Amino acid sequence: MDPTLATLLTCPICYSQARSPIYQCTNGHIVCSECRSRITNCHTCREPLGHIRSLIVEQIIRTMQAPCSFLPFGCSEVLREEGRQQHEEICLFQPIPCPFHTSPCTWEGVRSHLSNHLITVHPQIPKITQNTIFFGGVDIQITDGTWAAMLECYSQIFLVKVSNITSDTPSFIIKIYLLTKPTTNTKYIYNIKFKRGDHAFRWTSLVHEIYGEITPPSPFPIPYLELPSDTIHFFGPHHNFKFILNLSPLPDGGRH
């Protein structure tokens, strides 16, 4: 896209390419719909801003192709507006924050760089070359509310994250992420098992894609495990809970 034209089609507030619906002031200055909801005066000329649609600009954008918004991070896709949102929601070059950003860690980058970041900046995270782990943690010792490990298996790297969420109803959340770029269409599932005496609890779900919290297909409607603290402590008295986690490819290869 011509740089001058790209500037004309850019929202002057958020600096992203405007998407339908696009609004304009009486002087023709545009603003995207998300920014329009936050202002009452034109950002460019300060005139009162009504709800006038800029239909010409919307038509121009619909007929043009433009690079993915994540071009600066390495994506080379050129897209029309109608398919842009769907692509960018799952774009492998979408920048993501470090999963330990509450520590705080301010790193943000593409998924392919995340595993190296975790190894160099968070060396306390163990890296295990197998598809099964035994977690025997004490929840009050989970650093900053989070425990994690990386599993290297099936030529991929996975991140296991256990978070202690303190709220009116304290709970634990267990999520599994795929850090590396998939080389095939294979999907992966994980199985979690808690056991105490004759009592057992088992959970199976689809592994997250790290670039988005996409709801997995049936029969896995919920992509992570969240359990209240009292349930966790039932399986591990004295705040010491244990579980076994196993990773494996989806039996049908992930085709639905």
Image (tube, rainbow, N blue to C red):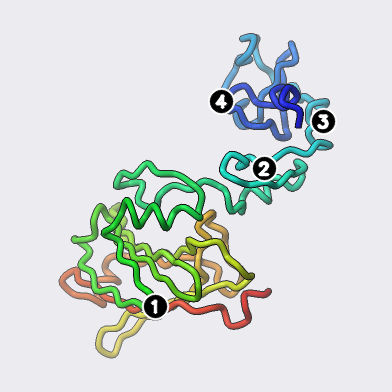
- Residue pointed to by mark 2: 68
> Which is nearer the N-term, disc 3 or disc 1?
3
Q: Which quadrant of the figure contains the N terminus?
A: top right
Q: CA distance from mark 4 to mark 2?
A: 25 Å
Residue 170's mark? none
The residue mark sitting in front, 3 or 1, is 1
The residue sitting at 69% across, 23% down in the picture is 7
> Which is nearer the N-term, disc 4 or disc 2?
4
Looking at the picture, does residue 70 appear above or below residue 184?
A: above
Q: CA distance from mark 4 to mark 3?
A: 25 Å
Looking at the picture, does residue 197 appear above or below residue 61?
A: below
Q: Amino acid at mark 1?
A: Gln
- Residue pointed to by mark 3: 60
Residue 195 x/y as whole percent: 30, 83
Mark 3, residues whose alpha carbon is within 10 Å: few (<14), some, or many (≥20)? Answer: few
Q: CA distance from mark 1 to mark 2?
A: 36 Å
Q: Is residue 233 left or right of residue 185?
A: left
Q: Amino acid at mark 4?
A: Arg
The residue sitting at 74% across, 48% down in the picture is 83
Q: Amino acid at mark 3?
A: Ile
The residue mark sitting in front, 1 or 4, is 1
Q: CA distance from mark 3 to mark 1?
A: 52 Å
> Which is nearer the N-term, disc 3 or disc 2?
3
- Residue pointed to by mark 1: 130
Mark 2, residues whose alpha carbon is within 10 Å: few (<14), some, or many (≥20)? Answer: many
Task: Give the secondary structure at mark 2.
Answer: loop
